[in-house]
Amino acid sequence: MRKEIYITETNCITPLGFDVESNVEAILRGDSGIQLHNDISLMPNSFYASIISDENINNAFAEVSSETKYSRLEKLMILALEPIIKNSGVELNSKTGFILSTTKGNVTALKDNSAESFNNAHLDVLAKNVANFFGFQTQPIVVSNACVSGILAISIAKRMIQSGLYDNIFVVAGDEVSEFVLSGFNAFQAMSDLPCKPYSKNRTGVSLGEATAAVLVSANPATAKIKVIGDSSINDANHISGPSRTGEGLFRSIQNALKEAQIEANKLDYISAHGTATPYNDEMEAIALTRLNLQNVPINSLKGFYGHTLGASGLLETVIAIESANQNTLFESKGFDEIGVSENINVIEKNKEASIDFFLKTASGFGGCNTAVVFEKVKHELH
């Protein structure tokens, strides 16, 4: 019998708020973090993105530390982790792991042409800086697999605890909107000239965003928010940036995750999808879901609220999905108007009450990676 795995603490830092509660309140109000920005240090022309104000970051960070040596992303990651490490009471001993998940990390350090800056751009340095702030005793683990990084980190944490290596693992995921990321997506002609509209007929691409999110993955059910019951990652080996047109990698990932979870597809009450609003991603997801008979399951993309937060997206969206399940509320897929994919999937158009016992989180990323994780609501017995 394999160990049961839970997520017991969650937190997120986004333009909509610096804790989970304020983020959910903003979503229920229909607020979006995506705004029009005119910042020539990031891009020569104006662009839509979801960006956290530096003032808010520095004010919040000043409350936890007076150190000035941390980069902007390090501050954001520390802010995401700090309350959950404190609340959990978990000792940072040899049985407590730390996973840092990111797509680009401190890539902005490369702006300065110095040996120190070059060193700071390494992902292992980022992970050590964050781990040392809290005094983790174990070697930090870096998960960097394009845009599935955040959700893949949960799969890896689950498997490591099941293998007996750790009892608890703190996971943090984060990425920033940088000149590098903006110019990259712009070169792909993948950036939308308006806030993104996942699954919509008139969608024109991604809006980029930044966030950090943190969770505690644990074998201890005492304060469980949700149970992690199945996971899988499959690479479709299709193209450096384009997903398989048949959704094969995502199809197999979901199929495997459901098999491990030992539930039928019709048991899923909700899908938190990747939904980047590019022509190919949304179409591929719709095809994969329909192949699995999941076209009627309520589905949303949170990209209309947060933009695409790269490696943070899978973890951030899981944190919000856990709230969705525990509050029995389906959140709207912001920006959606008229179905614009070939399969008629069930996109959530407005917030509504629903009973959510099982949900699926999916993500797909550059290089053909696809990850799916199935979660089950924990029923706490009243004694």
Image (cartoon, rainbow, N blue to C red):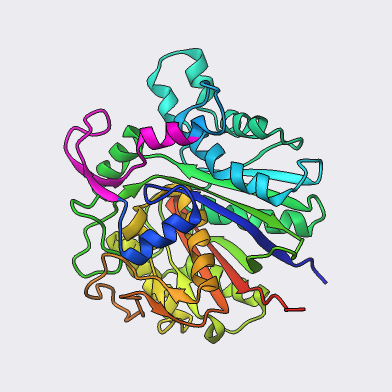
At x 53%, y 86%, the residue is: 266
User: Residue 68 location in percent, x, y?
Assistant: 51, 21
Q: Residue furthest top?
A: 114
| Residue 127 vertical placement versus 324 (above, below) | above
Q: Is residue 106 visible?
A: yes
Query: Percent x, y for residue 5?
Result: 71, 64
Looking at the image, residue 2 lies above or below residue 145: below
57 is within the stretch colored magenta: yes
**Percent of width and height locating residue 295:** 40, 82
Q: Is 338 included in the stretch rendered in magenta?
A: no
Q: Is residue 131 left or right of residue 108?
A: right
Is 223 on the left or on the right of 358, as rendered? right
Q: Between residue 79 and residue 339, name the one nearer to us.
A: 79
Please report the residue visible at 56 percent of the width from the left and 84 percent of the height from the top.
267
* x and y percentages locating residue 78 in the rendered image: 56, 37
Question: Residue 164 vs residue 326: left or right?
Answer: right
Picture quarter with the C terminus: bottom right
Residue 100 visible (yes or no): no
Residue 124 vs 371, above or below: the answer is: above
How many numbered markers are drawn?
0
Corner quadrant of residue 283: bottom left
188 and 201: which is toward the camera: 201
Please give the range of residues in magenta.
Answer: 34-60
Identify the residue at horizontal 59%, vertical 70% (top origin).
374
